[in-house]
Each structure stands twice: as structure tokens, then as C-alpha cells.
Image (tube, helix red, strand yellow):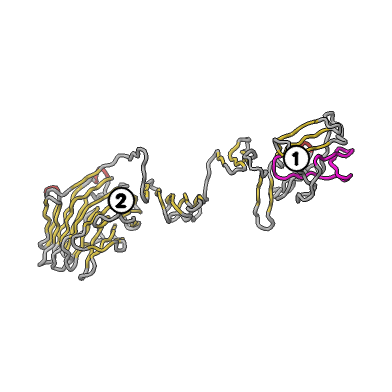
Amino acid sequence: MVRWLLVVGLTLLSAVPAYAQSAAVMPSARQQFLDNSGNVCAGCTLTTYSSGTTTPLTTYSDAALTVANPNPIVMNSAGRPAVSGAEVNIYLSQVSYKFVLATSAAVTLWTADAVPATNIGLTGVSNTGDVTLQVDTDNNSVNTFKFLNGAGSEKVSMNESGAVQIDSTLTIGDNTAADQAMLLDGGTQDYHLGVQNATNSLFMGRGTTVGTTPAMTVTSAGAITLTGAVDVTSTLTAGPSIRVDTAFETAARFTETNVGGGGTAFAGQGADLTTSATISSSTVISWKVIDAVNNGGLFTVFPSEFSTTLLIGPIGTDLQAFVGFGTPTIGGAGYTYTVNHIGFKIVRAASGSTELFATVAGGTETASAALTTLAANDSLDLFFRVISATSAKFYWRKNGSAWSAATELTTNIPTLATASSCSVGISNAGVATDSALWVHGASFSR
């Protein structure tokens, strides 16, 4: 660390290196002390103490702080500090000092206390471009870096204990194609707050990589997602929303379409959808939840949510089912999953596994990998949230287990403005076997 000199009136002997300048003001090269009448202070003494005390504090005659000056230092006939007849410089450790100048008769001329070694210490590291700034090392929070605007108003300050105050906008990042983040380095757990460039979303989470372990996500559309347990210790108020629920109490509320002997029965525990064991067949029921003309379609107003509870009945050789937003085309040969929809599908083919998938389509389908396998008599809770035109998140739980993590689909989310109905349906996909699906209830909200 470059060490700084005490000069006349406690100014600097050596100038701060002018890294970004072509010239610098010449400093005072030698200290000279005067008495109160302005005369050369021959024989005067300068005694140095630790700031605020009477404990002597050493000064040095070399910048490496290896050769100690006597304390007090005696001035020669020219009023300059000298040791054994040789004039010396006065170098200070980077702490705060108290200085007492006295005549040769020990009459105090002045005392200066709480004087830092320098306003700032600066080190330029050769060939690296690194610069170290340091105030004195007593770490008493007194000395402060300050950045002022052209009018002299303080905009940023940082004291030597590390406390920072910013009185203007702090901008992180420069609109480049990279994640921008603020990292918090914890003892055993790090955290981040940053913007992920790929999704243009704000993430707050654990670790140092933006978006990998989020606790909260804010999309560019303003939708907020919390991940993990949420402990609310005060009032949490949500904005207004609408909600349409059904327990499938009566057929009159629904539009039912049957093919080849498939059918839906409405009973006390909901709707029972079955296919025929003797012919290719299907059944589907739909129900209108909004007026798309005046209120916007299912696929154009965000966020929106759907939930349902199903019981898996007998499973035939082949099976295709769907539940969610939209009314994709269904018949005895199965579903056409490219028609506008957002929801879940259940698929079994050629006596293979019966599997659950998340699915969206706006002319082309995007489906998740299989979420879980299903068996007869499994109870299934399903939930999805459409956050934006590029984000829908799906959750499921089976037989009362914990909810799954979110499965997000981001492509081919439909944008049809006139969709107004939800639906649930089942088909034996062209194979004459009996399959059944009980739907206990469903809920739509936005």
C-alpha cells in the first residue's frame, strides 16, 4: 500500500497517482513548521499520539514504514523535521493521529486530533488494471469514501466498516445477452437476486446461478410465482378474481357428446365417463365458464387457473383422456391433440403403461414427458396455472401424496380469443374395451 506523507498543515507530501490524467499538481516536497507568528519554528517539537489519546504513535522516515522517527520529532533551524542533523520525511501508518506542536520551551502551539493518515490510500497493481482504495486502518467508521455530483451533492458513500448509502438509481447490467445478478455470499448458503436473460424474468433464490433454485419469480408480464413453503405471518391480500366451480350435479348444465356407445352418467359423486367394451367409442362433456365476447377468451387473459379431482376407473387396452381448457376434437379413434387446449391428458396404448402428461396446443401440440403412471382406482388431483402466453405450469398429486414440483410448458400455448369452455373426455382409441373416469369436481378462476 502506498504510504502518504504528513505535510505543512497536515497536507500530503506525495500526490495520489494520476491514473486517468496527463498532469498533476506538484505536492509540497518537504514539511516546514512555523510558530504562531509565522516565524520558522526552530527547535520546535512535534509529538504524535493515537487519535483521542495520549498514547504515543510512531511515525516513520521511509515509505516502507521500517525506520521509526523519534517521538517527539525535533525541528532544525529551518523548521524542518530532522534526526541527527539530517532532514527526514514523516510517513504515517494508515490510522488516525493526534499531533501536538510545541516550542523548544514546551509551550504548545497547536493540537490537531482525529487526523487520518490520508483522505484516501490508492494502490495501482502493475499490469493488471486493479486498483485498491483504502482509508485508514483503525476501522472506526469515521472515514468515508464519498462520490459527489457536479453540484457537490453526495450520491454514494461508503464508510470504512463497509456500510454503503446510495442516493440515486443503482443499475446492474448493461442490456447485454447475459444474466445480471446481485449475489449475497452467506456463511453456509448463498442467495441471488437477478434477471435471467433467456426468460426475461426476475428471480430471487438460493445459490449463485440465476433461475436454478428460485424462491420467487416475476415474469415480464408481472406474474409472480412462489416456489416452496410460504409462511405468512401477517395479512396477505390478493387482488380480485372470479371463480366458477362445478361438482357435476346435473346433466342440464353440460354439453355431452357421445360416440359409439360411450356415455356420461351424473351422480352424487360427480360425472362418470365410460367407453364401450364392444365398439370404438368416446364421451366428452364441456361447460362454459366465461363470456369470451365481452370478457376475453380462456387463452388470452392471465393469470388463469384450473383444478380438478379424478378417480381412475377400469383401464382398457387403449385409452386417451383429456381435462382442462378448450374442447379438443375427440371420437372413437381418440383425441386430436393439436386443437387449441391447455390441460392434462391420460394415455395408454397397446396394453402399455397408463401415463399422465401436461399438454398445450395452438395448432401444434407441446406435451411434457410422462409425469406419473396410473392404475385403476388411483385418485388424482390436477392443477395448472397459465401465467402468460409463454408460460403454463402444471402440478399433480396421486392418492393423497405431496404435490409435485411444477412442470412448465412455454411453447405452442394457444392464443384463440373466442375459447370459453372447459371439458373432460375419454376415448378407447379405436380398441373396443371398457375404460372409465370419475370426475368429482372442477374449478376455474382468473
From this viewpoint, which residue is outermost toward the bottom?
350
What amino acid does circle 1 point to?
Answer: Pro
Magenta span: helix, strand or loop, mainly?
loop
- Dot 2 falls on a residue whose secondary structure is strand
Where is residue 49 shown, x and y percent of the image?
A: 74, 38
Q: Quadrant of the C terminus?
A: top left
Indicate whether residue 142 is drawn in magenta: no
**Nearer the observer, disc 1 or disc 2?**
1
Q: CA distance from mark 1 to mark 2?
A: 71 Å
Left or right of 136, for residue 90: right
Tell me the residue at 88%/36% (across/down): 42
- Dot 1 falls on a residue whose secondary structure is loop
Tell me the residue at 31%/63% (across/down): 369
Residue carrying label 1 = 56
Q: Nearer the viewer, residue 24 or 269?
A: 269
Of the two numbered discs 1 and 2 on the same chain, state the one appearing first in sequence. 1
What amino acid does circle 2 point to?
Answer: Arg
Where is residue 432 shown, x and y percent of the image?
A: 13, 68
Image quadrant in which you'd find residue 165: top right
Where is residue 370 shown, x and y percent of the image?
A: 29, 63
Image quadrant in which you'd find residue 98: top right
User: How many badges with numbers are in the image?
Assistant: 2
- Which circle marks residue 385 in the picture? 2
Asked whether residue 130 is in view, the answer is yes
